[in-house]
Image (tube, rainbow, N blue to C red):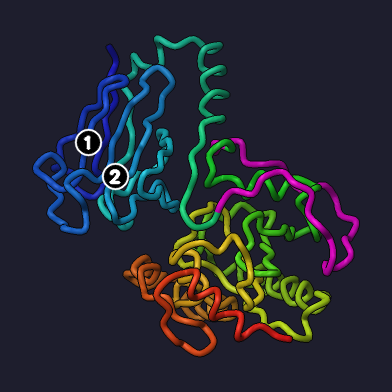
C-alpha cells in the first residue's frame, strides 16, 4: 500500500512522519514531532491520508490555531491539504509539507484522478468567525451605481473552491452577490453581517492574505478604501451611523478583503465573543494603518499573539463597560443606538 510523508520544513534533521492510507494519526507536542511548545497540545491535529487521491484531511483538536497556509483550521473543523500547501502545527509555527510516494500516482489513472479532483473540490467544513457566503440575492440599496466593465477573471482553479475558506472567491464571481464592481474590485454584502451594514471589498487580483501584500499593492488598497468610502457615502443611514473600514489580523477566509461595517453591531449574526472581539479590538486593523505600514515597511506585519485578542472580555466599544455575556452586551448596545 502506498504511503505519504509529512516533512518538517524548518528542521532538516527531523525525520519525516509516515501516514498510511486512511489511517488516522494524532500529532502534537511530543517526541514524534519534537515540538516542546506548550501552546501546542499533545493532541493538536488528527491527520488522515488518502494516498489514492493525493491529499490529507487535517482536523484541529487543540485549542490554539492550526493553519493550512494562511488559513486557520479552527478547533473541531476539518480541511484538506495537498502537495504544495503548508501545514503549520500551531500559531503559524512548525511548518510541514506533504509528499506522496511515486507509486501513489502511477497507480492512479488519469480518469480516476479527474474524478477524485472533482470530489475533493466538493469537500467542505464550517469555519470559525467569518462564514462562507451562500449564493443569495444581495440588495443593491445604498450602493454606488455599477460601472460597465469587462468580465472579471475566473476563479483560481488551482485551489479547492469547495472548501469553506475559499468561499469568498466563489461569491465574488456571482452577479447575484455583487453590489458594486469595477475593473479592480468587487463589493459584496457579508452573508453573515455583524451589523446593520456590512460589506466586503475584494480585489480581482488573487492576494491570499495581509502577509502576501507588497509595495506594488499600495495603490490597490487605496482604491479599495475609496470604494469603501463611496459605499458609506451612498448609504441611506450614513448621517446617523458611524462606520469603520479595516482588515482582520488573521482572517478565516482566504483572499484579502476589506470590511466596511457600521458600528451599531445590531445583527442576529453577532453570536459570540470571537465575533465581537474581531471587530472591536486591535484584531481589527484599520485600513489606513495597513496602507501606512505597507508604504513604510514594504510589508504588513501581524502583531504576535493577535489570536489571543479574540479571548478578551466583552467590552462595549463605545463606553468600554464590560459585559458578562453576549445577550447582556446586545441589550447594552441598544443604549448607544441612534434614535
Q: Label 2, on which residue?
A: 61
Quadrant of the snapshot with the N terminus: top left
Q: Is residue 168 left or right of residue 189?
A: left
Q: Is residue 125 left or right of residue 266?
A: left
Q: Residue furthest left?
A: 31
Q: Is residue 68 left or right of residue 168?
A: left
**Residue 81 found in image quarter:** top left
Quadrant of the snapshot with the C terminus: bottom right
| Rendered image: mark on residue 26 | 1
User: Could you say where residue 56 lies in the image, as x and y percent from the top left?
Assistant: 37, 31
User: Could you say where residue 262 lies in the image, as x and y percent from the top left?
Assistant: 66, 75
| Residue drawn at x 65%, y 72% as measured from the top left | 261
Cα distance between the residues tagged 2 and 1: 9 Å
Q: Is residue 111 left or right of residue 7?
A: right
Q: Name the foreground residue: 314 vs 140.
A: 314
Decide: is 296 above or below 265. below
- For mark 2, does the 10 Å Cα neighbourhood hold few (<14), some (14 to 19), or many (20 or more) residues? many
Decide: is 97 above or below 234. above
The magenta span reads 131-160
Q: Main secondary structure of the magenta part?
A: loop
Q: Secondary structure at mark 1?
A: strand
Amino acid at each position: 500500500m502506498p504511503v505519504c510523508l509529512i516533512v518538517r520544513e524548518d528542521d532538516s534533521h527531523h525525520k519525516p512522519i509516515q501516514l498510511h492510507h486512511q489511517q488516522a494519526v494524532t500529532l502534537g507536542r511530543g517526541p514524534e514531532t519534537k515540538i516542546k511548545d506548550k501552546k501546542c497540545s499533545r493532541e493538536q491535529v488528527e491527520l488522515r491520508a488518502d494516498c489514492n487521491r493525493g491529499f490529507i484531511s487535517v482536523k484541529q483538536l487543540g485549542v490554539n490555531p492550526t493553519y493550512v497556509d494562511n488559513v486557520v483550521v479552527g478547533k473541531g473543523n476539518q480541511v484538506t491539504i495537498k502537495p504544495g500547501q503548508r501545514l503549520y502545527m500551531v500559531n503559524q509555527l512548525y511548518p510541514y509539507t506533504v509528499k506522496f510516494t511515486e507509486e501513489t500516482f502511477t497507480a492512479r489513472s488519469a480518469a480516476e484522478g479527474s474524478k477524485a479532483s472533482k470530489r475533493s473540490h466538493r469537500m467542505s467544513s464550517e469555519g470559525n468567525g467569518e462564514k462562507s457566503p451562500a449564493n443569495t440575492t444581495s440588495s443593491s440599496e445604498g450602493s454606488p451605481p455599477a460601472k460597465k466593465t469587462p468580465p472579471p477573471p475566473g476563479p483560481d482553479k488551482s485551489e479547492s473552491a469547495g472548501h469553506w475558506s475559499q468561499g469568498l472567491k466563489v461569491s465574488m464571481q456571482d452577479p447575484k452577490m455583487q453590489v458594486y464592481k469595477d475593473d479592480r474590485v468587487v463589493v459584496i454584502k457579508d452573508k453573515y453581517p455583524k451589523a446593520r451594514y456590512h460589506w466586503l471589498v475584494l480585489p480581482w487580483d488573487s492576494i491570499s492574505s495581509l502577509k502576501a501584500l507588497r509595495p506594488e499593492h499600495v495603490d490597490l488598497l487605496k482604491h479599495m478604501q475609496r470604494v469603501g468610502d463611496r459605499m458609506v457615502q451612498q448609504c441611506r443611514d450614513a448621517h446617523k451611523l458611524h462606520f469603520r473600514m479595516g482588515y482582520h489580523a488573521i482572517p478565516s477566509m482566504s483572499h484579502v478583503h476589506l470590511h466596511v461595517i457600521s458600528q451599531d453591531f445590531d445583527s442576529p449574526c453577532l453570536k459570540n465573543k470571537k465575533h465581537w472581539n474581531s471587530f472591536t479590538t486591535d484584531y481589527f486593523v484599520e485600513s489606513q494603518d495597513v496602507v501606512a505600514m505597507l508604504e513604510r515597511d514594504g510589508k504588513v506585519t501581524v502583531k504576535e499573539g493577535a489570536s489571543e485578542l479574540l479571548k478578551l472580555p466583552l467590552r462595549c466599544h463605545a463606553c468600554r463597560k464590560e459585559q458578562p455575556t453576549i445577550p447582556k452586551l446586545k441589550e447594552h448596545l441598544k443604549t448607544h443606538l441612534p434614535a
